[in-house]
Amino acid sequence: MATAEELGIEIASVASGESWGCSPTDDDPAVRAKIVEFTRRALQVAKWLGTDAYLFVPSAVDVFFWRTAPWSPTTSATSARHAVGQLVPTAEKLGVKLGIENVWNKFLLSPLEMRDFIDSFGSTAVGSYFDAGNVLLTGYPSTGSRSWARGSCGSTSRTSGSPSERPAGFVDMLEGDLDFQAVRTALERIGYDGYATAEMLPYEPGRPEKTAAAMKKLFK
């Protein structure tokens, strides 16, 4: 936190990939307990860093980059609700939101499913960490009554391709299929005035500068 202040930057959120390999939907109760305890500590770290949002993947029916047998949607939903329910008291106490991200996990595929999942906890400590690029696989990020324009806006974009090609189909901002201007307009219409996060993976020399230029162009 002190280092960030010295550099003149603000930490907008915290994320971890821990729940991919240590999933809240794992068949082993010990694994499920482990990720809940890890996330409790991560929420505390987010608080220490002066931010109020922690990106969380609560479940996965299937993960294309993780070699494991798929879980059923019903089992995933039950385990995910149990895990998040255990985390809500900590999140509320610390004032750090659990941002449920829409990812390529074949779980919470539509905005209505995401809404109902979040609302089921009855807590303002559970929200959405919205990745506009991820939506392109199964829906529309900015148009229609099923609009995904809620919560924080991730910046991943992708090129067209068959499902087998999509993992390698990510491109830099403003170079893919996503209409970022339409997403920005949708966010403005709902009165969103929070942060927009640029996801830069993998790191390459010059990519941060390129991404910063794209962000300035989009949000000038």
Image (spheres, rainbow, N blue to C red):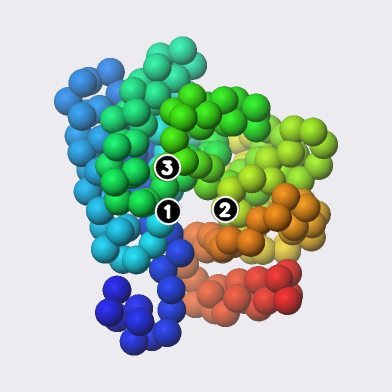
Q: Secondary structure at mark 2?
A: strand
Q: Quadrant of residue 5?
A: bottom left
Side of 168 where 36 appears, left or right: left
Do labels 2 and 1 touch, CB within 8 Å?
A: yes
Q: CA distance from mark 2 to mark 1?
A: 10 Å
Residue sitting nearer the eye, 96 or 179 = 96
Identify which residue is drawn at 34% across, 23% down: 82
Residue pointed to by mark 2:
152
Query: On screen, 33 above or below 126?
Result: above
For the residue carrying disc 1, how many other residues have a C-alpha within 10 Å: few (<14), some (14-19), or many (20+)? many
Q: Amino acid at mark 3?
A: Ala
In the picture, the disc for residue 53 is 1
Q: Which residue is mark 3?
A: 125
User: Which mark lies nearer to you, 3 or 2?
Assistant: 3
Residue 102 horizontal/vertical position (percent): 55, 39
- Label 2 sits on what residue type? Ser
Q: Is residue 130 left or right of residue 8?
A: right
